[in-house]
Image: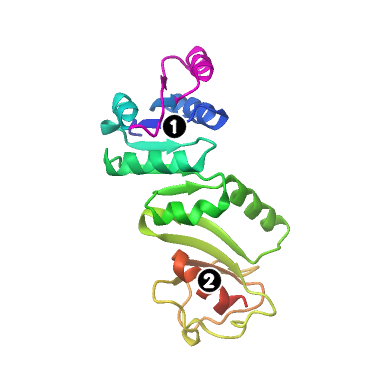
Amino acid sequence: MKSLYIVIVGGGNIGYYLSKALLNQGHEALIIERDVKKCERLEDELGSCCLRGDGCETVVLTEAGLNRADVLIATTSHDEDNLVSCQVAKHRFKVPRTIALVNNPNNDATFRKLGIDATISVTNTILEHVEQEIPVHPLIHLLTMSGHMEEVIELLITKDSPALGKSIGQLKLPQDTTVALIIREGERPKIPSPDAVFKENDRVIALTTPDSEKILEKILLS
């Protein structure tokens, strides 16, 4: 496995455990943290891996050697700071991949539209896992590929679904949407043909875009 140079903005619990795991995997990791005491704790426990400063400032990112970084991960508790750090890394330093923690789930779409390669919303992740155990909403986000403005979602066909009993070819799906799999209880997952007919409790895995998600939801779920 290739060793990567990864810069982490934010030395809180997420930044600490993330950098520890990356170092253990043989990667080079540097944390940028404003707070002196946090920096000292990180240095004591992990060695020389912390740079004191503001991860939104170009001069600090330059000192961190961001021009050679493979990934920047922003993990602070402030969404605005995470967004700025990622945008500066992407546009000023041409970092190949940026990842941002999104504390407020309402900001997730904005981050993706502004070109952040990957977003992590702890709130959404927990809710989606809860929904898998106690189904409340029949749509689950499985993967977001923000750099390409695409996402993989799972939809559950219920007895009230307007798509029930209809084939994929009969439905006017958005042009940027592909039904990749149909998962049916007791059967192997299938890559569906246009003639595939939706049945109750089918789990549909689809590749779509944020703009088309609501359209797909209306066609399959309500």
How packed mark 1 is, by other alpha carbons closer than 10 Å (few <14, some 14-19, many 20 or more), is: many
- Pick whichever, 25 or 136, lies toward us: 136
Spot occupied by residue 133 in the image (x, y as percentages of width and height): 71, 55
Q: Residue at x 45, y 14 (%)?
A: 47
User: How far apart in space, not on screen, are marks 2 and 1 (Cα)?
Assistant: 33 Å
Q: Hey, which quadrant is residue 61 in on the image?
A: top left
| Quadrant (top left, top right, bottom left, bottom right) of the N terminus | top left
201 or 131, nearer to the observer: 131
Q: Position of residue 26 (x, y in %)?
A: 40, 26
Is residue 44 placed above or below 93 in the rendered structure?
A: above
Residue type indicated by callout 1:
Val
* Label 1 SS: strand
Under mark 2, the amino acid is: Lys
- Residue at 56% in and 86% down: 166
Image quarter of residue 155: bottom right
Circle 2 residues within 10 Å: few <14, some 14–19, many ≥20: few
- Residue 214's label in the rendered image is 2
Where, quadrant-wise, is the C terminus in this rendering? bottom right
Dot 2 and dot 1 residues touching (CB under 8 Å): no
Residue drawn at 52 percent across, 26 percent down: 16
Instruction: Estimate the x, y position of residue 217 in percent, counting from the top left.
Output: 56, 73
Task: Name which of mark 2 and mark 1 comes first in the sequence.
Answer: 1
Query: Is residue 134 found inside the magenta-colored segment of the image?
Result: no
Magenta stretch, residue numbers: 33-57
Question: Residue at label 1?
Answer: 9
- Residue 1 seen in the figure: yes
Against 208, is 132 above or below? above
Q: Up-down: is 40 above or below 120? A: above
| Res. 180 visible in picture | no
Question: In the image, residue 202 lies at what x, y percent?
Answer: 62, 72
